[in-house]
Amino acid sequence: MPPGAGLLSNDLEALAAQARHWLNDPDAAAAAGTAARGHALRHYGLDRFLADWDRILEKVTA
């Protein structure tokens, strides 16, 4: 997970504190959501999927 995209933890107190922070600061919550969405699209989105397939097809047909 990229910096600023959220909190990855199994510490319930840390998770609750982060949730409270976002509830009290909607701009911080939106920024974290934007960072997480960008990361997800770069790593798991359709563009990445299609680029991976293009590389594989080029490799096996070369």
Image (spheres, rainbow, N blue to C red):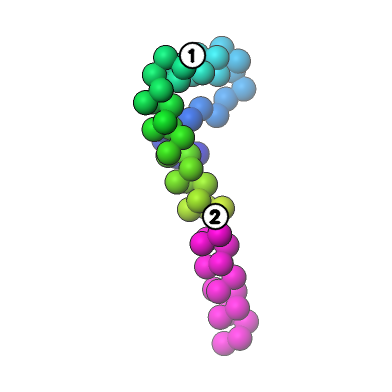
Q: Give the residue drawn at x 41%, y 35%.
A: 3
Residue with the mark numbered 2: 45
Residue flagged by tag 1: what amino acid is it?
Arg
- Count of residue discs: 2
Q: Give the residue drawn at x 59%, y 18%.
A: 11
Extent of the magenta region: 46-62
The vertical placement of 60 against 32, above or below, is below
Quadrant the C terminus occupies: bottom right
Q: Position of residue 17 (x, y in %)?
A: 50, 13
- Work out whether residue 14 can be spotted: no
Q: Is residue 53 magenta?
A: yes
Query: Position of 58 compared to 2: left or right?
Result: right
**What secondary structure characterizes most of the magenta part?**
helix
From mark 1 to mark 2, how far is it between C-alphas?
30 Å
Residue flagged by tag 2: what amino acid is it?
Gly
At numbered mark 2, what does the secondary structure look like: helix, strand or loop?
A: loop
The answer to the question of whether label 1 and label 2 lie on touching residues, with beta carbons closer than 8 A, is: no
Quarter of the image where one finds residue 9:
top right
Q: Position of residue 2 (x, y in %)?
A: 45, 39
- The numbered disc on residue 20 is 1
Q: Give the residue drawn at x 56%, y 53%.
A: 44
At numbered mark 1, what does the secondary structure look like: helix, strand or loop?
A: helix
